[in-house]
Amino acid sequence: MMSSCARASVAVRASSVTSTTSKNMCGARRGAVRACASNTTNARFALLFDCDGVIVETEELHRLAYNGAFEHYDVRIDGERVDWVVEYYDVLQNTVGGGKPKMKWHFNQNAWPTSSLFPTAPTTDAERDALVDALQDQKTVFYKKIVEEVAEARPGILELMDEAIADPTIAVGICSAATKAGFEKVVNSVVGVERLSKMDVVMAGDDVTRKKPDPLIYNLAREKVGLPASKCVVVEDSLVGLRAAVGAEMNCVITPTASTASADFIGEGAKAVFTTLAGVKLHAMFPNEATEPNFKF
């Protein structure tokens, strides 16, 4: 129950948040991100990046945004405000992929809460879905504001991405479990529209019916780039993402965050673990004339 967790202060207040609108790209529908100017011809390999935790260390930003949404709607279990402290969120993010699944898992494990939306805890699937949908929408508003103010790329990530984009034999993509609105804010702000327009595949959690650790998003990415799984390398930061990649029979390398560093990634099938991607070079992973990716460097 949440009563066993110490309360943490929430850094985001409803009064400080303003909504933003995602930019269109290459004639895509409003809110959509898609590639339109890929440089790839006769791809030998594919390099697929997760977003949260890989491109940007966003998990603390997500945690604060969830807590902001819980406060906004006065979400309570047994009279105590729901508040995800750091230690609990570290476990949660390594257990469940995607925002709505996280909340449903938490409420199912503890109790469905009361709120300003439902003064009596919801009991039907429709009511529970409505509560989670509203919380996710408000969380996204908070999250986009935080990203706009503080998000920055992890060391080495954009350099590796640029090398891959420039190599016509490497297909490049981003595959995230995050809700599209929050995902777009991160990639538009940090990766940039120009890089995104040159990618072969860009997918968010809303683009699939089952989120990580289900391998669906990576199976669909493989179909889009037209390569067998053995030719695809996924960059992830968590066990949830690793399990999705392994489930798709893809090679996976890990660049862990502080909250995921203690996991046994190699034991779960990762090919390599890099504390940072700074200094990791594309040609070392995909040597000229190689028929398989290389991870011994």
Image (cartoon, helix red, strand yellow):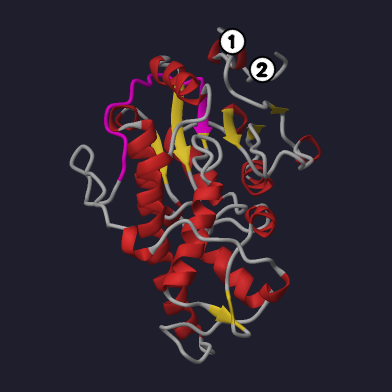
- In this rendering, position of residue 114 left or right of residue 143: right
Q: Residue at x 41, y 53 (%)?
A: 143
Can residue 209 be seen here? The reply is no
Q: Is residue 291 magenta?
A: no
Are the residues at dot 1 and dot 2 in contact (C-beta closer than 8 Å)? yes
Percent position of residue 118, x then y: 45, 87
Of residues 108 and 78, the one nearer the viewer is 78
Residue 53 occupies quadrant: top right
**Image position, residue 292 (x, y; %):** 64, 19
In the rendered image, the vertical position of residue 241 relative to residue 199, given as above or below: below
Q: Is residue 282 above or below residue 20?
A: above
The alpha-carbon separation of the residues under discs 1 and 2 comes to 7 Å
Residue 39 is covered by the magenta coloring: yes
Residue sitting nearer the eye, 209 or 21: 21
Q: Quadrant of residue 282?
A: top right
For this rendering, which residue is in front, 157 or 252?
Answer: 157
